[in-house]
Structures are given as structure tokens and as C-alpha cells.
Image (tube, helix red, strand yellow):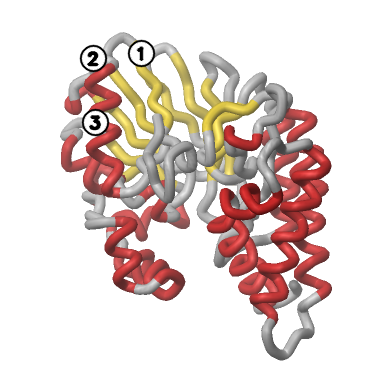
């Protein structure tokens, strides 16, 4: 379902329904919670029949609504990477980091009221953790690179993978003659190019026929998209290294460079949107990718 985060068809929440019960994968923001509940109702699933809210990572566009969902779904437990669990129980630091990026007014307007998750209802999912639910098993794999608190989830019933942001973003407006694309998201502040490359390989090694990305929905042709991601992660890293020594104006140079990568990808993939339309559609991602690169360059070893 569409969480309508920054716009329509930008952020998705995935719901797995089995025999009248449900699992929600990524909650999106607090303002999206009524949409999630409406989507459940449309499937005939009452809030008390939600068993788990599963998080790929704790960035607020994926996890900001988790506490509110738990308040509405009294039988649900929250699963989260061990590095992110404390931020769900006490989201104050997570909110402070978001305010530092967007400002307080924009944070409140975009993310609404972020409620803490009751500690007793939080389940940590480290590398290799499994969760039995109905007739299926969910396998959790540690997949850093976008964030150190990121995991992907394989559903044994379908073999499909819920990848959060580890397999990039793929907006449907840019599909060309049925051909999908994937573009890495290097959002602040834990971008790690080698780690992200390895995470993409881990996902591919699971041999899924389909992957569900948070931005936006199901993608197929996994091997081709993975090759594009490897190439584009490398292009972002090279852009960062090229401007690592800039003493001033580095963020703007990085933003301009990411925009150039977008336009080159538009030409390569044959997007039907004009150059201006493509840049407008990806404006938020260009800004965040530049900020992620800037933060990466400030870390040791970048």
C-alpha cells in the first residue's frame, strides 16, 4: 500500500495476510497509520489480528509510525535490528537526528507524533534470526550500507525478499516499456559503499524472483537491477572521493554530482520523463544522497 510520505507512489508499506491475520513490514510515518489500518480493513483484518510489525530499519519514513501501530494493534509485537531497538523504545535521539537534518517544524509536519514502543513488545532480530508465522518462516539478514541498523527479510512461502532501502529505490513513474530500474539511496548518516555492495550481493544470493523495496513496491529482473546498483554505488563513491578535499561548498558540489548521475541514468535507461521532470521527481533523493555522501566523507577511512 501507498503510505503517501513525500508524495504518492514514493513510500510503500507491505502487508502479508494469511488466514485472516497479518504482518506489516515497515510502518512508514505516524501520519500513514490511518492508511495502514484502512488497508487492513479492506482485507478484512481487524487491528487485533495483526501479529507483527516488522522493521527493515529505524529511519522515520520506515519506522516512525511503529509506536502508533502498536497502540492500535494490541496483539502485535515489533521486530527490529538490535542496533535500532533502543531507538524504538526511546525515539528521542532518533527524532533529534531528524530535526538536525530537516528542522523541528518540518519534522513535526512530516513525521507527526512518534510514540515509543513498549519494551516488552520489542523483539530484536540479529543476523540469522527467524520468525515462524502461520505456515511460513521469515529469515532476517544483517544488511548494512544504507544504515548499520538495516536488515532484509526473506519470506519462505514465496522466496521473495523485503529489502527496505538495501536494494535501492525504484519509482514506477520512471519505468520504461515495462523495464524497471534501481537507484541507490545513500541517505545520512551511515552510508558505507563496500558494505552496501556486499548487502546487495547477499540479497541476490537468496535468488528471489521478486524484491519489495520501500520506495516503491515490487521489482523483478533482480540480477540486472543488482548490476545497475553496483555500478551506481560505485559512481556515488567516486563522486564523494572526487570532492573529499573540498574546503567549502562540498555539499552543493555533491548535490550537483548526484544530479548528473541521475541524468546519465535517465539517458541510459530511457526514462520517458524529461530531464527537468526526472530531477524534480528525484529532488528529495538527490538532496539526501548528497547529505549521505557528505557524512560518509567525514568518517574515518572514507
Task: Give the number of the mark in front: 2 or 1.
Answer: 2
In the displayed orientation, state which residue is furthest to the top: 19
Few, some or many C-alpha atoms within 10 Å of disc 1 (few <14, some 14-19, many ≥20)? few
CA–CA distance in space, label 2 to label 1: 11 Å
Q: Residue at x 16, y 34 (%)?
A: 74
Percent across and percent down for residue 107 are 34, 65
Task: Give the number of the mark in front: 3 or 1.
Answer: 3
Q: Residue at x 63, y 44 (%)?
A: 168
Q: Earlier in the sequence, mark 3 or mark 1?
A: 1
Q: Which residue is mark 3?
A: 37
| Of the pair 260 and 229, the residue shown nearer to us | 260
Quarter placement of the C terminus: bottom right
Percent across and percent down for residue 215 are 53, 41
Q: Which residue is mark 2?
A: 44
Percent across and percent down for residue 133 are 38, 21
Residue 17 sits above or below residue 28 on the image: above
Q: Residue at x 34, y 48 (%)?
A: 29
- In the image, taking residue 96 as reference, residue 130 lies left or right, namely right
CA–CA distance in space, label 3 to label 1: 16 Å
Quarter placement of the N terminus: top left
Residue 198 sits above or below residue 192 on the image: above
In the displayed orientation, state which residue is furthest to the bottom: 247
- In the image, taking residue 8 as reference, residue 261 lies left or right, namely right
At numbered mark 1, what does the secondary structure look like: helix, strand or loop? strand
Q: Which residue is mark 1?
A: 18
Amino acid at each position: 500500500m501507498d503510505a503517501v510520505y513525500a508524495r504518492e507512489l514514493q513510500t510503500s508499506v507491505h502487508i502479508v495476510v494469511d488466514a485472516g491475520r497479518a504482518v506489516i513490514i515497515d510502518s512508514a510515518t505516524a501520519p500513514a497509520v490511518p492508511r495502514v489500518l484502512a488497508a487492513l480493513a479492506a482485507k478484512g483484518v481487524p487491528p487485533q489480528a495483526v501479529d507483527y510489525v516488522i522493521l527493515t530499519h529505524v529511519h522515520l519514513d520506515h519506522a516512525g509510525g511503529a509506536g502508533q501501530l502498536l497502540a492500535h494493534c494490541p496483539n502485535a509485537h515489533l521486530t527490529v535490528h538490535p542496533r535500532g531497538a533502543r531507538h524504538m523504545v526511546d525515539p528521542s535521539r532518533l527524532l533529534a537526528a531528524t530535526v538536525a537534518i530537516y528542522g523541528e517544524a518540518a519534522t513535526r509536519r512530516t513525521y507527526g507524533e512518534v510514540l515509543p514502543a513498549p519494551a516488552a513488545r520489542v523483539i530484536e532480530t540479529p543476523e540469522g534470526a527467524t520468525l515462524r508465522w502461520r505456515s511460513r518462516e521469515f529469515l532476517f539478514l544483517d544488511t548494512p550500507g544504507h544504515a548499520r541498523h538495516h536488515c532484509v527479510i526473506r519470506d519462505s512461502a514465496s522466496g521473495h525478499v523485503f529489502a527496505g532501502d538495501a536494494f535501492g529505490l525504484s519509482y514506477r513513474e520512471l519505468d520504461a516499456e515495462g523495464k524497471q530500474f534501481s537507484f541507490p539511496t545513500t541517505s545520512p548518516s551511515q552510508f558505507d559503499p563496500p558494505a552496501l555492495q556486499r548487502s546487495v550481493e547477499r540479497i541476490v544470493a537468496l535468488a528471489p524472483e521478486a524484491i519489495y523495496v520501500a520506495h516503491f513496491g515490487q521489482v523483478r529482473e533482480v540480477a540486472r537491477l543488482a548490476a545497475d546498483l553496483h555500478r551506481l554505488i560505485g559512481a556515488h563513491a567516486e563522486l564523494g572521493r572526487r570532492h573529499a578535499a573540498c574546503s567549502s561548498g562540498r555539499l552543493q558540489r555533491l548535490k550537483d554530482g548526484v544530479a548528473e548521475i541521475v541524468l546519465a541514468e535517465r539517458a541510459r535507461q530511457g526514462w520517458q520523463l524529461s530531464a527537468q521532470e526526472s530531477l524534480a521527481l528525484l529532488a528529495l533523493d538527490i538532496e539526501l544522497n548528497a547529505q549521505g555522501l557528505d557524512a560518509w566523507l567525514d568518517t574515518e577511512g572514507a
